[in-house]
Amino acid sequence: MFIIPFRSLTPVLQKSDHIFTQILSKSSSQQNMVKKALVFLAPGAEEMEFVIAVDVLRRGGVDVTVAGIPDSNVVKCSRDVYIKPDIGVAQSSAKGPYDVVVLPGGLGGSKAMAESQEVGNILKNQECSGGLIAAICAAPTVLKAHGIAEGKELTSYPAMKAQLEEGGKYKYSECKVVVDGNLITSRGPGTAFDFALTVVDQLVGKDKAVEVAKAMLLDY
């Protein structure tokens, strides 16, 4: 009978432990990968909805890229607030893929996004990949313009209801925030925090959304 001394087993055990630790480390790093968000910013955007979305997502640990439409020049928002995007929309795909694409509202901003072929292509790719799409206020009309999320339940600013119901492509709701699969929609400036926290919830988890809300003295 051939017996291997215990001491000679030690390197084998140590090597196995090292491999096991590497596997666990790799698995953990994959689970903890930072989520990425692309937020559009177009002239006439509702600045509250834009800023709250970006701010709350970053508080939630999400890596946010702001893409200006049509380019990276300073954008004048609906209440004459000026904001500088990180990049132009044409450069945004190169920094992807993104876990969520966010569309702030505002009539002017929504119109610009609805007319942008680049926005349409990004949304179609996001939908095909199963990534999240989040739109608030007038921005759900952008989804309709590009044929995105048809058949899903959504909400919007009340004045957009008739436009979204026309053609029967969407199920309309008047809830503050609606989540239907990979689509998140909300109503307007007054629901912007609920909207942004819901995006954090869907991306990072309920615990993180509650933590972020608590730090801002909000309930979630």
Image (cartoon, grey):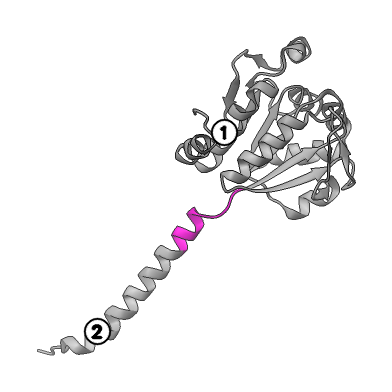
Mark sitting earlier along the chain (1/2): 2
Instruction: Answer above or below: position of 195 versus 163.
Output: below
The kind of residue on which mark 1 rests is Leu
Q: Is residue 70 left or right of residue 201?
A: right
Q: Quadrant of residue 19?
A: bottom left
In x, y percent, where is residue 62? 60, 47
Coordinates of residue 137 in the picture (x, y in percent) = 72, 22
Element assignment for label 2: helix
Indicate the secondary structure of the residue bearing disc 1: helix
Residue type beneath disc 2: Thr
- Would residue 131 be visible to someone looking at this image? no
When asked about the image quadrant of residue 75, the answer is: top right
The residue range painted magenta reads: 26-35
Q: How many marks?
A: 2
Predominant secondary structure, magenta span: helix
**Residue at point 67% right, 20% down?**
187
Q: Which residue is mark 2?
A: 10
In the rendered structure, are the residues bearing label 1 and label 2 in contact, judged by CB atoms less than 8 Å apart?
A: no
Residue located beneath label 1 in the image: 197
